[in-house]
Image: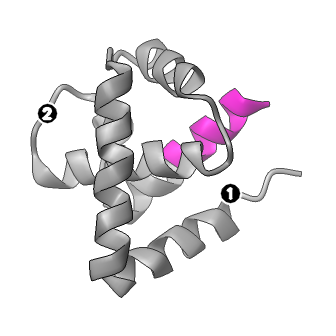
Amino acid sequence: MKAKIFKKYAEQISNHFELGEGEIFQKSKRRDIVDARQLLYYMCSNRPMRLRYIQEYMKQNGYDIAHSSILHGIDVVKKRLVQDEDYEWLISKVKDECVIH
């Protein structure tokens, strides 16, 4: 079940950031890709999804990441939410699009 949710979040976030399929899992420091990845961590952690699961699903998609990096990404999004009201809209939109029946 959690893998399905992860996949759906990754697809929707990639669409909103106008990233190609799988770009979110590329080893890249390009700002839009990093922002999308960090948002993915945040969305999954608030589902709630354990960090270990997030880490494993990222690895299954070719992106090996440490727990500390996931936590950092989540913190970055939390700070951004306070500063940028568009992020709150984006999170709400992704949640609505990712309703799993």
Examine the rendered structure and indicate whether residue 11 appears above or below residue 84: above
Res 25 seen here: no
Side of 45 relative to 1 (left or right)? left
Query: Could you tell me how far apart the alpha carbons at marks 1 and 2 are, in whole angstroms?
Result: 25 Å
The span picked out in magenta is 1-10
Kindly state the secondary structure of the residue where label 1 is placed: loop
Kindly state the secondary structure of the residue where label 2 is placed: loop
| Mark drawn on residue 28 | 2
Q: Amino acid at mark 1?
A: Cys
Q: Whole-percent x and y of residue 24?
A: 32, 39
| Mark drawn on residue 62 | none
Res 2 seen here: yes
Asked if the magenta segment contains residue 37, the reply would be no
Q: Earlier in the sequence, mark 1 or mark 2?
A: 2
Side of 83 relative to 29 (left or right)? right
Q: Residue at x 31, y 44 (%)?
A: 73
User: Looking at the image, which is closer to me, 42 or 62?
Assistant: 42
User: Looking at the image, which is closer to me, 62 or 87?
Assistant: 87
> Quick one: label 1, few (<14), some, or many (20+) residues within 10 Å?
some
Examine the rendered structure and indicate whether residue 53 appears above or below residue 86: above
Q: Residue at x 37, y 73 (%)?
A: 81
> Quick one: label 2, few (<14), some, or many (20+) residues within 10 Å?
few
Q: Residue at x 33, y 18 (%)?
A: 66
Q: Amino acid at mark 2?
A: Ser
User: Looking at the image, which is closer to me, 46 or 26?
Assistant: 46
Examine the rendered structure and indicate whether residue 83 appears above or below residue 39: below
Name the residue carrying label 1.
Answer: 98
Q: Whole-percent x and y of residue 8?
A: 62, 45
Residue 92 sits in which quadrant? Answer: bottom right
Q: Whole-percent x and y of residue 51?
A: 53, 27
Q: Are the residues at dot 1 and dot 2 in contact (C-beta closer than 8 Å)?
A: no
Q: In the displayed image of the protein, which residue is found farthest to the left?
A: 30
